[in-house]
Amino acid sequence: MNIIPGDYETSRLISRVLMMYYMEDRSQAEIGQELGLSTAKINRLLKQAKNLGYVEINIHTPFQHLLTLERELETTAGLKHAIVVPKLGDNPKALMQSVGNAAATFFLEHLRDGDIVCMGGGSTLLAMVEAAPVDQKYNVTVVPASGGVQGRYESDVNNLVADLARKIGAKSLSLHAPAITDTPQERDSLMALRQVHEVLDLANHAQIAIIGIGAIRPATVSLFHFASLSQEDILAVTENRHAAGEMLMHVVDKQGRPVESVLSKRIVGLELEALKSIPLTIGIAATRNKVIPIISALRGGYLKVLITDEETAKEVLDGIKATNHD
């Protein structure tokens, strides 16, 4: 039967189907049986009703605003996925746990047997590792994306790699090198070692990269806890007016471009450009002091996925929109 918008009988039939389907919560099969129509016919009538404007769907879920925020971030920043966790209080530790839970869930949903996963260090990645369940087993390899720093659990990336691999039944490799050497010559010597460049070569060919996004200022931020830097080195970075954020110890400006610094030729780890070729690069960062670093990472095109909290996401989106209008 052809549906003619002006036909009274057809409109009446559609109205009856809509009432039974939406108001009485009847299945399409039940409606078809009662009205003597096929399920396929009921389905076509429901679609026709939407096309005619008979149906207007409003979704009222507690976190609908977060889904809208995620879609806006994806569209505006060119992300494959944005995951935004709600602010449920003023406890920073609870917020970090929420972000870690969201990151672990997303990561495992996209993990496939045979994958190589590379990761950096930091408190947000520690939260993700702690949130990972122990009841799933994957045939994957987890490797560091950079060297580590002894003395701080969350900054020694080998610890995080080993813990994540243990939890998901994966194989792990360690990178026995510091994140930042004292001199460029030391860095070159380390990079020439087979044990070092083989691990970093695996990281370069990873299917998934998980990284933190660090702030540069003040001088007490995590970057300077996670790297054995002299006070002179710290000042050289924090006083550089172009420095806006950090990923895997690499400093970037507000547009995401690498900034030459005292660290540039002393970093043991992936180059920033390598992140762009990894199919799924997941950036995890929370709290408002990460807004400028996140915008920098997004503008540089290093991330495919961003996982953050609600307040940070709003400020990031506002910042991107504002600079787009400049």
Image (cartoon, rainbow, N blue to C red):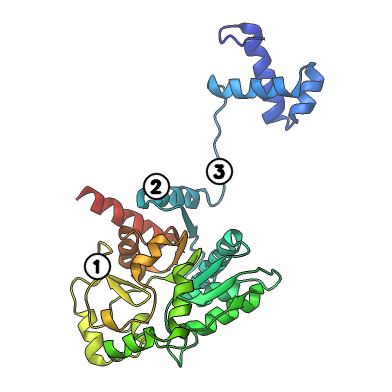
Taking the image as shown, residue 240 lies to the left or right of residue 136, namely left
10 Å neighbourhood of mark 1: few (<14), some, or many (≥20)? many
Earlier sequence position, callout 2 versus callout 1: 2
Q: Position of residue 179 (x, y in %)?
A: 38, 84
Determine the image quadrant of residue 4. Answer: top right
Could you tell me which secondary element the residue under label 1 belongs to?
Answer: loop
Q: In this view, does 312 lie above or below 21?
A: below
Q: Where is residue 24 in the image (x, y as percent from the top left)?
A: 73, 30
Front residue of 315 and 201: 201
Residue at image coords 45%, 84% = 194
10 Å neighbourhood of mark 3: few (<14), some, or many (≥20)? few
Q: Can residue 91 be seen in this view?
A: no
Q: Is residue 298 visible?
A: yes
Circle 1 or circle 3, nearest the eye: 1
Q: Name the residue beneath numbered marker 1.
A: 253
Q: Name the residue beneath numbered marker 3.
A: 60
Q: Which amino acid does label 2 sit on?
A: Thr
Q: Name the residue beneath numbered marker 2.
A: 75
